[in-house]
Amino acid sequence: MAREARGKVAVVTGGTAGVGRAAVRELAGRGYDVAVLARGEAGLAAAAADVRAAGGRALPVAADVADERAVRRAADRTEAELGAIDVWVNAAFCGSLAFSWDTGMDEWRRINDVTYLGQVHGTLAALERMRPRDRGVIVNVGSAMAYRSIPLQAPYCAAKHAVKGFTESVVTELAHSKSKVRLCMVQLPGLNTPQFTWNLNKLDRHPMPVPPIFQPELAGRAIAHLAEHPRRNMWVGLPTAYTILGERIAPKFMDLYLGRSGVTSQQTGQDTPRLGPNLFRPGDDAEDRGAHGPFDDRAHARDPLLELSLRRTAAFGIAGAAAVLGGAAVAVLRRR
């Protein structure tokens, strides 16, 4: 990995597991010093060790993103100990696998407080520091479910829809202010993360991502790419593309299709670990859980949509050249 970025500072919320952990490793590998915000002590220690192994400075901060003051204190501490924050990644979330009517209001609120308001708290804490400097990048981690909700995850889907709405509103405010701070979103497919070992689960079978399943390192690469090449929105995974486009083209069909297949596709008979829900307590306090979940044998490590997105400039250049050549050929034929 290139090391020229060493000295830049990134903050990753939810950075001890899954997508957040993959982002921590990818950013550290690209030369960033990284502050990791999460609740689990073992996960924090292991994530910090990953950063140091890549040659960077690490700052593990025990913080609950649902607590606005804790997030602001973490931002202050990051700038005091590592320096000005260049990149802020909002990856923390919690979720459930249950019918909406079987989900308690305390559970609804907790998922909203972490998955939606946690991103609001992180974004505003970052903007408070980045706007006066007129630089910086914020990446809000979304989902295909920010566009198309599915059964059994109503609180999570609602929170991701809210993240999308919040982010788009703030983007317009930054544009009005002519700010050079960039606020980005990345939309993700089903990933092989520890989420499915510690989701709130009120069904008999074990949770699993909706297939096809992808490895979290793909999300980590996308997040790091946005940190260095910011743009408004980025999709990872072909299923993300056809889910979002399917909702735009045929929402009623999607209702019927997901009503028929969406419940069973999120459950498996595989004997995966059940660590208990991490809504109100961290799942990696006593033991590091890493980036991967229990579906390595089914998860894809490559995604053609991501590869195209990472090479978007080159792809557009080739397409443009092809269009010019095609137009020239047509003109020649017409003259003949």
Image: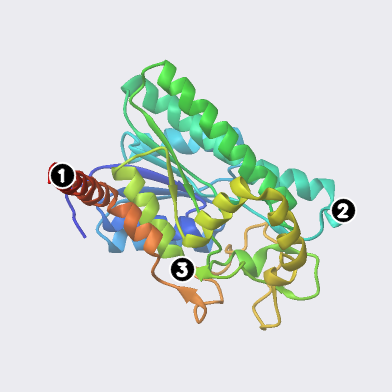
Q: Secondary structure at mark 1?
A: helix
Q: Which tag, 3 or 2, sits closer to the chain's start?
A: 2
The residue indicated by pointer 1 is 328
Q: Locate residue 277, reporting x and y percent.
A: 71, 62
Q: Label for residue 101?
A: 2
Which residue type carries mark 1?
A: Ala
240 and 322: which is toward the camera:
322
Q: Is residue 16 visible?
A: no
Number of the label disc, if any, that sits on residue 215: 3
Residue type (three-letter) at the residue carrying disc 3: Gln
Instruction: Tell me the number on the disc at residue 264.
Output: none
Counting residues from the start of the chain, the first of labels 3 and 1 encountered is 3
Residue 176 in sight from this viewpoint: yes
Q: Residues within 10 Å of mark 3 (few under 14, many from 20)?
A: many
Residues packed near mark 1 inside 10 Å, few (<14), some (14 to 19) or many (20 plus):
few
Camera-side mark, 2 or 1? 1
Front-lying residue, 119 or 259: 259
- Above or below — where is 26 with respect to 146? below
Badge 2, how many Cα within 10 Å: few under 14, some, many 20+? few
Q: Is residue 89 left or right of residue 200?
A: left
- Secondary structure at badge 2 equals helix
Residue drawn at x 57%, y 64% is 284
The residue positioned 55% from the left and 39% from the top of the image is: 119
Q: In which quadrant will I find the N terminus?
A: bottom left
Measuring from the top left, give residue 316's x and y in whole percent: 26, 47
Which residue type carries mark 2?
Trp
Q: Residue at x 46, y 28 (%)?
A: 171
- The colour scheme is rainbow
In the rendered image, the vertical position of residue 152 relative to residue 169, given as above or below: below
Q: Are marks 2 and 1 in contact (CB under 8 Å)?
A: no
User: What residue sits 18% from the left and 47% below the top?
Assistant: 321
